Amino acid sequence: MRLNVFRKGFNYSQDGPGNRLVYHLQGCNMRCAWCSNPEGVAMKGTLMVNPEHLIESVCPHGAIVHKDIDRERCVRCTTMECINQNRNQSIRFSSLACDVETIVSEAKRSVRLFYDGGGVTLSGGEVTVQFEEVALLLQRLKDEGIHTAIETNGTHSKLQDLFPVIDYLIIDFKHHDDRALRAAAGMGNRLIKRNVAKAFASHKHLLIRIPLIGQVNDSAADAQHFASFFRQFDTTQARFEFLAYHEYGKDKWAQCGMPYRIANGFVSEQTLALFHTVFKANQLEVIRT
Amino acid sequence: MDLHSIYSNEEIGHLAKARFLEERRLKRLDGWFLAKEIRRECDGKFQDLPPVIKAAETMREILARLPISISEQAIFAGTQDDAFARSYALINPTFEVNSFTGYCDPTAVFGDIEPNEIFTKERIDSLRDYEKSLPFTQTLNTAYALAGSSTEEAVFFIEQVTGHLIPDFKPALARGIAGLIEEIDGKLRTNPEPSKRACYEAMKIALAATVSLADRYAGCARELQDAACGKRKAALVLLEKTLRRVPQYPARNLYEAIQSFLLLWQVMCLEQAPNPFAFSAGNADRIFEPYRAMTDSSRDSSAALFKHFLTFFNVGDRSWAISQNVMVGGKSLSGSDLTNPSSYALLDAYFEMNLPQPILSAKLHRNTPSALYEELGRFFFSPGVLTPSLFNDDSLFDVLARPGVDANDLENYSIAGCQEPLIMGKDNGNTTNSWLNLAKILELTLHRGTSAISGKTLGLDAPALGMKTNQSAELLFNIRDAFYTHVEHFVDTMVAAANEASRAIGLLPVPLLSSFMGGIETGVDLRDCQEQGTKYNGSGCLIHGLSIMADSFIAIDQFLKERAGESERLLNALKTNFKHDEALRQYLRSCPKFGNNIESVDLEARAVAQRINGLIAGKRNYLGNPFRPDWSTPSTHLLYGHWVGATPDGREAGEMLGYGLDPLYGEAQSGLGFRVLSGAHLPYKDMNGGYASHFGINPSHFRGKTLAEKGLEFQRKVVAPLFSRGPDGEPGPFYLYVNVTTPETLRQVLANPKQHAPSGIYIMRIHGTFVNFLDLSPEIQQDIIKRLDLESTSPA
């Protein structure tokens, strides 16, 4: 069984405890304008182009002219010589199919690097888009005694089925309001809320992440609404984290040939402090990874 | 009376710093020249004596006649200044890569002494001409004649090895030279072999001459007392008294032990002057701990004395005596930790002095105490402060045991120079005897023996490489076989030439050093080419270009898979350095590269290393012992790369090669974790000659609140993952040096040295040795900045 992966690498403590081997899985069912991994959104993968070394001869079909690529031609292209034959540092396809056992083997070789309680994290894209493959991989990792974590947007109806093979669960909870989330990310939050509720009830190591995006979910009222939703549950096993808007992935939008649509999503220190204050007042433990 | 009843620890420390500053003002090093002039006289005077006795008598003359002095800041007598010239290329500000010709010509050193009224041009020329006529030089010329044209473009180099050993002074400290002479007398009473008797007589003469040198220094101290007063006078009285005792008799405290050690070191270096680089002290903590313990000297008091011990190793204005290694820590055969109070006192001295020499190495293992890592934190995370090399005992014991080192000797391995492991006092490894450039051989293979740099024919043609046609595709499809055939060809020549160079140096016996290298046991000079004088013997081969080879083979594989019809194009592009084919260079650059945890290329690197390890270890040196594969490239990755044309990995002509076992600069972009995983595939178990590897590490990745916490964090995040065992329990990596800084920081240091290094000293590591970053030639400074390669070691 194979998984489509668009990036992998180690990360310390930001995607679960300790040092972790993080696999970013291709494909996402949301369309967040602030996404820092736009190359991971399309299910089939994305052609990433950096004009620096782009040479016209890379494409025999004439799609590259003066370091610019005509993606309309790429859509129709079936041979893709640019990545199969005329390789170039400036052009690559995001998605790579990886066998589950290959990943398990790589994880086993990496045990030496799982210090401070580390292990493997599956992130995205959205991991549950490849649900069956992910379930198998997590089980295999558990079989090998490797600590597992996933970061999910919480939209999969069977997410709870994965809980037994997830040691550390990260759910991105992007908005408290169904319509607002639908407007911002193309999906509502009904399933997310249901999954979060199940996670509060049955997962012992839960981190709820809230990306704070200016003009989207960063008002004082938003802070209260988020907190109001969470405080109805027993959150003693859960932690919360705010991820302030950043533009680390902005260049990649251009590389993917997609316009970056957020004019100014930054949030102030005061806003962050306000969210901290509101959550603390509601006995919600906020951490920073 | 002891020194601490005269001076406080602070005063002793201040004296050490003042002594170092005094040394840095020294712009001329003429002692080696005087020593050589005395040798010339002695060549005539003692011409009828057996060579080994002639060598000893010559030492006696040199030690009796060389001018000596004791600095006002010194608390010990002795100097290395007379053994070194201002030669070492990489710390010479005028050094340029394209001017490098190796360290081969024994008379080149005469170009390193500037004529003046005393050392006139005529005087220098006269001695140079004489040296050219010596049998040693003549034999060495024969060695280079054997090498033929191969050294012209750095296919390989050979050299006669001086220095690069680890003497065992412990018996001399414990029993005194008198004790050693007594032992030799015992050997003489029972050993009738003339050659051995001559060797023993020579050792006695050389050892006794060392005592005479101590007496001369004692006399010097006595004379200085007349003009001195107060504390200085008392210190000189103590010094005189000490010099009347050691090294002749056993040391009774740390002060006497250090004094004894320094005089032995001085004479050992003089015996091989000029420029016996990379003599190393071994585990100084274990050597000195018994003497520290005799008086229960405190950590501070011991550190104060060690500051002068360290200062001694710095020669002249740029610390010209490079690669002298001092070790701390390590484990016993049973696995228990061997750090001791002297380990920590030495670290204190190192940190506070922060000198360019001697270099510091820490032996680590699974039971290394946290306290040691806490102490190391301040070294790693203080800008401009020296950082220790790290050795992994858990792996190295296995690596050394495989070719036959006795179990009881393992804990006494030490490092000669930068990273070559030898058994202290027992192992003549000839570590830098030969140097092999795999990337150049690949280039010559791809062009069927013709250099892409000069157009000269330096290697084998197509038939000799096993090709039936001149077809490019045939060559590329068979590139591995052709390459290894070519390597065999060059290695055979290299080995013959290297062994001849060893025979040349064998004409210059070293009786004093031999007495600390097992010679008292064997009665054989350590350089003897007929009979083995040391328990262990081998010859080194420094192998260059691992990552280029792996990346190139994989790129060729992929090229043939995807573009087999364009083989001619590839060879033409390489020949012309991609001048008209940037598209193809881009293609090659985008192929998988070693260091990114990509199995195909990582396993190719393993295969290349295995094949070359086996090939080198299968060659025999002048005594019939195996050559030792050593994958270190002490800045020669830069020098050799200059002579290598474009390679199939997309590297352009003249660009540097990869450093040691490391990925080519800029090619590992996937962070520390993947780099460690890639490196874990390599066959360290067969690298008994050593290897080099460097991590440039961004300090911002460490979160500890204190330096001690960061030291522990360094252990968890870098040391422990790296030094893990390999697949199937194979020995894992056993060496690393680091520079914890950023390119931006170093550029700021260069732009404003007074702000960042007010003392004029900003210590960096360059291959295995410390250097003052500000002393380096601009090209080497830029190499260091470039090779930090932080993308390859980022945590994500």
Image: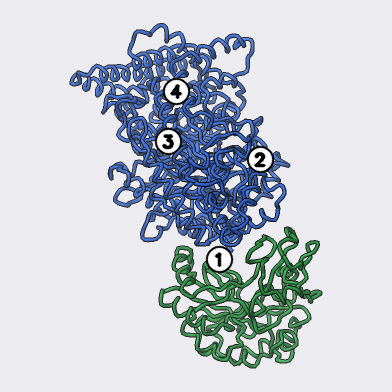
Chain colours: A green, B blue
Alpha-carbon span between mark 3 and mark 4: 29 Å
> How far is the residue under mark 3 from the one under mark 1?
44 Å
> Mark 3 Cα within 10 Å, few/some/many (few <14, many 20+)?
some
Mark 3, mark 1: which one is toward the viewer? 3
Q: Nearer the viewer, residue B256 or B68?
A: B68
Q: CA distance from mark 1 to mark 4?
A: 50 Å
Circle 2: element type: loop
Q: Is residue A46 left or right of residue B144?
A: right
Decide if residue B246 is in sight here: no
Front residue of B783 and B795 = B783
In this picture, is B118 found above or below B241? above
Q: Earlier in the sequence, mark 4 or mark 2?
A: 4
**Labelled disc at residue B492:** 3
Q: Is residue A131 visible?
A: yes
Q: CA distance from mark 4 to mark 2?
A: 35 Å
Look at the image and tell me in which quarter the C terminus of chain B lies.
Answer: bottom right
Mark nearer the viewer, 4 or 2: 4
Say which residue label 4 marks: B272
Q: Amino acid at mark 2?
A: Ala
Depth-wise, is mark 3 or mark 4 nearer the camera?
3
Please tell me whether mark 2 or mark 1 is closer to you in this view: 1
Question: Which tag, 3 or 4, sits closer to the chain's start?
Answer: 4
- The answer as to whether the residues below labels 1 and 4 share one chain is no
Label 2 and label 1: CA atoms lie apart by: 35 Å
The spot of residue B519 in percent (x, y) is 30, 27
Which mark, residue B757?
2
Assess whether mark 1 and mark 2 are in contact (beta carbons under 8 angstroms): no
Observer-side mark, 2 or 3, equals 3
Q: Quadrant of the N terminus of chain B?
A: top left
Look at the numbered discs 4 and 2 and tell me whether their residues touch, using CB distance below 8 Å. no
Determine which residue is flagged by label 1: A10
Name the kind of residue labelled 1 in the image. Answer: Phe
